[in-house]
């Protein structure tokens, strides 16, 4: 979770520089994403109950690297939609109102992180196969970060600190639909991963 969201932010900033756009995130907004949004969600993910059948999985000796090839692919597979979606929305908004464009970028990445946290509950099980209430910490953390994001967008004091401006309902719908792409991508990956595991079991 932390690797993919961090890489998503890095790719977003690097991508904006590569295509000649202004920075899509300000320093205060990066701190907000890393310490507030990520801070609640990564702790909640650590409370995720163990998966059923875990003890039946064949033990593999840890390799030299913490991030192996498979994990690196998963990280970039989840980070790319974050960067592409955020940059696309930032580009659409920044010429008309740069303050609103910054708000869009911040909120889009935050919503990407909400979806991604639920993605990362299991390496192979679909989100739709899991009981959302089995991790009450994640439910609570998600509600908290949603409320905090609304505060960052609509509270006058936070608007000055975070350089944000109010968003309309249509803005939120576009953001949510864009951010949901990370869940769609991961659901496709999990489908093929489960099929690969089933094929190996049948050999």
Image (cartoon, grey):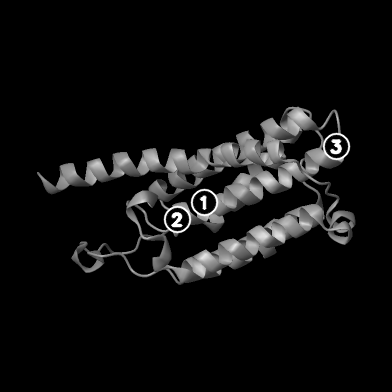
Marks 2 and 1 close (CB-CB < 8 Å)? yes
Q: Is residue 157 left or right of residue 10?
A: right
Residues packed near mark 1 inside 10 Å, few (<14), some (14 to 19) or many (20 plus):
many
Q: Quadrant of residue 28?
A: bottom right
Label 2 to label 1: alpha-carbon separation? 6 Å
First in residue order: circle 2 vs circle 3? 3
Residue 47, how many percent across, how many down?
45, 72
Q: Is residue 186 left or right of residue 58?
A: right
Mark 1 — residue?
116
Residues packed near mark 2 inside 10 Å, few (<14), some (14 to 19) or many (20 plus):
some
Task: Write the residue at 86% across / 29% down.
Answer: 96
Residue 77, how many percent across, how many down?
48, 40
Residue 130, how many percent across, how many down?
35, 57
What secondary structure is found at the residue carrying circle 3? helix
Q: Which mark is residue 18?
A: none
Q: Is residue 172 left or right of residue 177?
A: right
Looking at the rendered structure, the number of numbered marks drawn on it comes to 3
Quadrant that contains the C terminus: top left
Residues packed near mark 3 inside 10 Å, few (<14), some (14 to 19) or many (20 plus):
some
Label 2 to label 3: alpha-carbon separation? 33 Å
What secondary structure is found at the residue carrying circle 1? helix
Residue 76 at least partly seen:
no
Q: Which mark is residue 120?
A: 2
Question: Is residue 133 placed above or below 6 in the rendered structure?
Answer: below
Q: Which mark is residue 98?
A: 3
Q: Quadrant of residue 120?
A: bottom left
Q: Nearer the viewer, residue 157 or 125?
A: 157
Label 3 to label 1: alpha-carbon separation? 27 Å
Task: Write the residue at 10% across / 45% down.
Answer: 202
């Amino acid at each position: 979770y932390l690797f993919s969201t961090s890489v998503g932010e890095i790719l977003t900033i690097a991508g904006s520089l590569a295509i000649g756009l202004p920075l899509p995130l300000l320093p205060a907004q990066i701190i907000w994403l890393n310490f507030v949004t990520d801070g609640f969600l990564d702790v909640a993910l650590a409370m995720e109950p163990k998966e059923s059948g875990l003890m039946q999985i064949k033990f593999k000796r840890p390799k030299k690297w913490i991030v192996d090839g498979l994990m690196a692919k998963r990280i970039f597979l989840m980070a790319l939609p974050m960067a592409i979606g955020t940059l696309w929305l930032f580009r659409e908004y920044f010429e008309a109102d740069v303050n609103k464009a910054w708000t869009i970028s911040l909120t889009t990445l935050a919503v990407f992180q909400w979806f991604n946290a639920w993605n990362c509950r299991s390496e192979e099980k679909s989100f739709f196969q899991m009981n959302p209430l089995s991790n009450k910490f994640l439910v609570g953390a998600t509600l908290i970060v949603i409320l905090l994001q609304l505060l960052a967008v609509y509270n006058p004091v936070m608007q000055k600190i975070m350089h944000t401006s109010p968003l309309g309902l249509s803005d939120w719908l576009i953001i949510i639909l864009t951010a949901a792409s990370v869940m769609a991508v991961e659901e496709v990956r999990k489908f093929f991963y489960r099929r690969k595991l089933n094929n190996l079991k049948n050999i």
